Image (cartoon, grey):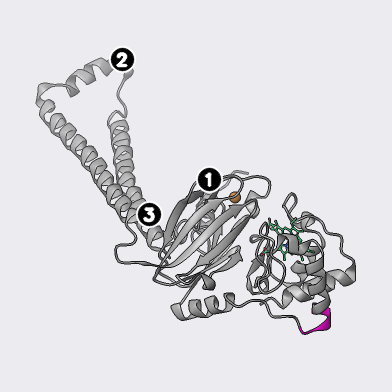
Amino acid sequence: MRAGRHEWAVALPLPLLALLSGCGGIQTIGGREGRDAALINDLFTLFCIVTGIFFAAIMAFLFAAYWRRRGWRADRMAEEDERLAAPSRGGALRVGMFLWTGAVVGGLMGLAVASFFTDRGLAHPNSDNKPVVSIELTGNQWWWDAKYHFHDPSKDFRTANELHIPLGAATYIVLKANDVIHSFWVPNLAGKQDLIPGHLNDIVLVPTRAGHYRGQCAEYCGLQHAHMALDIVVDTPADYQRWVARQQQTAPPPADPQARAGYVYFMNKQCSACHTIAGTPAGGQVAPDLTHVASRATIAAGTLPNTVGSMHAWVADPQGVKPGNNMPYIGLNADELHAVVAYLETLK
Ligand SMILES: [Cu+2]
């Protein structure tokens, strides 16, 4: 059975709806929650409108030409062509050609000028937004290492896979890479910027709406590239100050006996060789800082939601959760696993 007209009418918009449903949410190229993203999206919209108008005009001419030649006979084509090219028609044709050429040149110039001003806008984000936050963000296979810097270096702190930034202010981020090229991309807020080994790049974020956004490494960087996400939380200035004050605190010694056993285990086994927990002897630099790991939304760079269950799954078998990542299988027995997770859960 052939699909009737109505079925087509219903079926055709479905793929369009599916496409549109991708526009929205915490990770979308249609986002306008940051100054750069809004500039880029305005330019994109302008390009769509101008090229859309030309596309429609060309299609209209094509169909008009086809329509006019309806019923013309092939054996008389030469004759008809001659009639079209008659001197009496030349004037209108010439004017038409001038108008069309003018429209094309004008359209292209307009887009070039708009691109230029968008580019200038992206290049001068600091004219009225002096950076108030300074972050050093390092890409690693396959997680993000973040250091927040302050005028008083004793206030500096380190975190991983989650950035908080204040609403309406400029955050200056220096981008580095430890191993291969990665790319920092939070489409709701700004365009992409690469992280390149041995080279410093930077990007300025000026968020215009509070909320939770998702960033993603946008340069293929190996096996777990797809699991290299980044949570970005745009806080009101007051919330941001509270978050910073909390992050600057060191981890308190655990009170609960099980958590204390986990603490001892963490410090005496391999964990502390790779991970740092500020305020404890654990000072490893090659893995995510865990000082406030329990306060983050996800673990393993957005691979799992940060629940007690996923913390067990991760510590018990990191290679099962994220094959190929740089945390080895440690081989804990059940008591040790529960104790270590109990300790990690105290790190709010
Ligand atoms: Cu990457």
At x 24%, y 43%, the residue is 107
Viewer-proximal residue among 76 and 229: 229
Residue 75 — which label? 2
Mark 2, ligand 1, within 8 Å: the answer is no
Q: Main secondary structure of the magenta part?
A: helix
Extreme-bottom residue of the structure: 255
Does the magenta segment cover residue 256? yes
| For the residues bearing labels 1 and 3, Cβ distance under 8 angstroms | no
Q: Please, is residue 140 above or below residue 298 in the view? A: above
Q: Is mark 3 on a helix, strand or loop?
A: helix
The C terminus - image quarter = bottom right
Q: Please, is residue 244 above or below residue 56 in the view? A: below
Residue 191 visible in the displayed image: no
Give the image quarter of residue 245.
Answer: bottom right
The type of residue carrying mark 3 is Ile
Left or right: 91 with respect to 109? left
Q: Please, is residue 9 above or below residue 74 in the view? A: below
* Mark 2 / mark 1, whichever is N-terminal: 2
Task: Tell me the CA gap for discs 3 and 2.
Answer: 54 Å
List the residue tagged with mark 3: 40
* Mark 3 / mark 2, whichever is N-terminal: 3
Where is residue 297? Give x, y as percent: 63, 70
The residue segment tinted magenta is 255-259
The type of residue carrying mark 2 is Asp
Q: How many labels does the image show?
A: 3
Give the image quarter of residue 316.
Answer: bottom right
At x 53%, y 72%, the residue is 154
Where is residue 61? Give x, y as percent: 28, 36
Q: Residues within 10 Å of mark 1 (few under 14, many from 20)?
A: few
Q: Is mark 1 on a helix, strand or loop?
A: loop
